[in-house]
Image (spheres, helix red, strand yellow):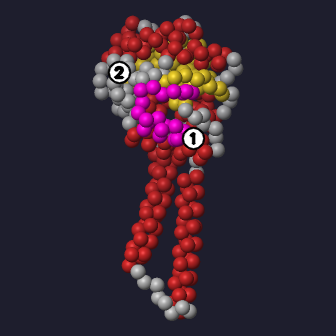
Amino acid sequence: MKKDLSIIIPVYNEEKNIPILYERLKKSAEVISSDYELIFVNDGSKDTSLLELMRIAEKDDKVFYINFSRNFGHQTAVTAGLDYSKGNAAVVIDGDLQDPPELIPELYAKYKEGYEVVYAQREKRNGESWFKKVTAKYFYRILKEMTHINIPVDTGDFRLIDRKVIECLKQMPEQNKFLRGQIAWIGFRQTAVFFERQERVHGKTNYPFSKMMKLALDGITSFSDKPLSFVTKTGFFISVVSFLIILYAIFSHFILRQTITGWTSLIISSMFIGGIQLLSVGIIGEYISRINKNVLDRPLYIVERTNIE
């Protein structure tokens, strides 16, 4: 049975935030419609997040939970929520309270104007280190330059999408999800609502540098072939330079009667070429790894329990 609005909330170790988040989401959703659903996706939390969700779901029939058998990752959790959602539109929002639930009515108002995608664009990021701010800023801009699609800068997964966009996402079964890129690739009419990202209330970030790097690699390898082009061009350039050096060595030995010697120059050139080779193999390996995961065709996630019928 279709609903007016689904709100998807991926959760990982957010036991202290869940009660506050639930109350704020409920108030925001009720401003829009009484026919809504809150879908919390517990992504293998190690705290009591699942118990909190089950407690709330027992009291409120608009609250649903999906519990994974283990941690499958943020993007997969969002995907599962969208798969189970029944809303004509769906909002994706993180469970750490850094994205304000009070912005949802504003997203919905833009949606009612005829936009299929309304994303929340950050004007300011409060409570985050300078390192994260700088790396996030340049990642989005580098990704935009490297890809052929218009991925909005300074935007995460906090957005509202129409049912037709959800159905398109279901036809994109790749294992290494980068939803903000996939939604940009799908197209339709898209617009932004600007906001200030808040400081985390409880707990610590679930996106350390290692996960940020993985997400960055997923985004680049999913929507750009420029790293492979870089490998090709670098290999061609080194081959040309090496060929010219060989010609010079032959000319110097037979014409100038001066044989080129030098242990240092030999070692430096060997290490340089070796480093380029390792970098090139690594880049190619990242693409092959993603091909392998898709060829294996394993389930994207495994649900241990849910109260969604």
Q: Residue at x 48, y 47 (%)?
A: 290
Q: Residue at x 30, y 27 (%)?
A: 46
Crowd around label 1: few <14 · some 14–19 · many ≥20 (10 Å): some
Query: Which is more toward the observer, 71 or 250?
Result: 250
Residue 26 position in % (x across, y down) = 48, 10
**Any magenta on residue 89?**
no
Inter-mark Cα distance, 1 to 2: 30 Å
**Any magenta on residue 129?**
yes
In the rendered structure, the answer to whether residue 229 lies left or right of residue 27 reads: right
Tag 1–tag 2 contact (CB < 8 Å): no
Q: Which residues are magenta?
A: 121-141
In the rendered structure, the answer to whether residue 15 lies left or right of residue 170 reads: left
The secondary element bearing badge 1 is classed as: helix
The secondary element bearing badge 2 is classed as: loop
Give the amino acid type for the residue marked by disc 1 in the picture: Arg
Res. 279 in view: yes
Q: Which residue is mark 1?
A: 141
> Could you say which quadrant of the image residue 247 lies in?
bottom right
Q: Which mark is residue 202?
A: 2
Give the amino acid type for the residue marked by disc 2 in the picture: His
